[in-house]
Amino acid sequence: MSETPAGRPEGAANAGLFFKRWLRNPLQMGSIIPSSPALCRRIAAAVERQPDEYVLELGAGTGVISRALLAAGVPPEKLVVVEIVPEMADFLRKALPGVNVICGDAFALKESLPEHMHNRIGTAICGIPLVLLPQDKQKAFVDAVESVAPGKGFLLFTYCITSPLPYGKLSLNAQRLAWTPLNFPPASVWRYQPESAAQAT
Ligand SMILES: C[S@@+](CC[C@H](N)C(=O)[O-])C[C@H]1O[C@@H](n2cnc3c(N)ncnc32)[C@H](O)[C@@H]1O
């Protein structure tokens, strides 16, 4: 990866690509700039994973959370990122050597995720702006994660003050894990887990 005159690796967050995609499809992007390092570190700190398990990141954008996960010790071969925009998936392949980059739809994980990864997800992280979606689409997302990572649920970051998901209606348990003012806008990290799985633990 080349460097800017200031010595910052070009494309470390690639805000230009991010903003270009936001102009084209603001609802799909949900934000005009990538998540901040402080938010990414908080997300990475919430990850739970056994040595043989994968971390699944959905809606990776330009890979700022992916980099925080790698910095926190997730081996590249155990990180799987799913991104629906081909241009961003191509960027991620070049920027994140050794990481499993899938250009696909997070709502169709059973089809897009290789079978050997099914049931071997330690933590799923959602970067998709679920709060903007109707409840039946939110439910479809919950079911998609459940189809490959039963009982695990997912981490979700949000700019909302309260839960971005109507978790009771989606049969989820919810816990706010972290908050940081060092993001634009300030953001929280939530963990959602199917009620049935939370009761069993
Ligand atoms: C708010 S951005 C988050 C990017 C990055 N994770 C971050 O925190 O800066 C949302 C990303 O989700 C992607 N996305 C939206 N819908 C998706 C879907 N159905 N499947 C996979 N990726 C999706 C968008 O293209 C975009 O890159």
Image (cartoon, rainbow, N blue to C red):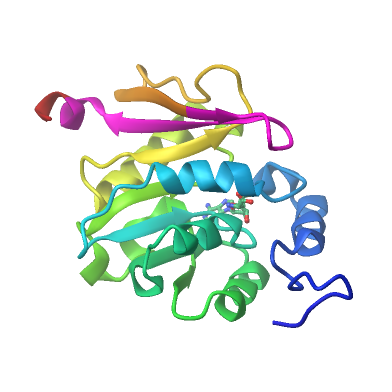
State yes or no: residue 122 in magenta.
no
The image shows residue 1 at horizontal and vertical percentages of 69, 82
Query: Residue 172 or 147: which is nearer the viewer?
Result: 172
Locate the C terminus and report the quarter of the image it occupies.
Answer: top left
Whether residue 52 is situated above or below residue 146 in the rendered picture? below
Q: Is residue 187 left or right of residue 32?
A: left
Farthest left residue in view: 200
**Residue lying at 44% horizontally and 57% vertically, measured from the top left:** 72
Query: For residue 150, which quarter of the picture?
Result: top left
**Residue lying at 45% horizontally and 55% vertically, measured from the top left:** 57
The image shows residue 100 at horizontal and vertical percentages of 42, 73
**Residue lying at 77% horizontally and 73% vertically, measured from the top left:** 10
Farthest right residue in view: 5
User: Can residue 127 be seen here?
Assistant: no
Q: How many labels does the image show?
A: 0
**What span is colored magenta in the figure?**
178-198
Query: Residue 158 or 7: which is nearer the viewer?
Result: 7
User: Can residue 115 be seen here?
Assistant: yes
Whether residue 87 is situated above or below residue 19 in the rendered picture? below
Whether residue 35 is situated above or below residue 195 in the rendered picture? below
Whether residue 126 is situated above or below residue 60 in the rendered picture? above
The image shows residue 8 at horizontal and vertical percentages of 77, 69
Q: Is residue 82 left or right of residue 185?
A: left
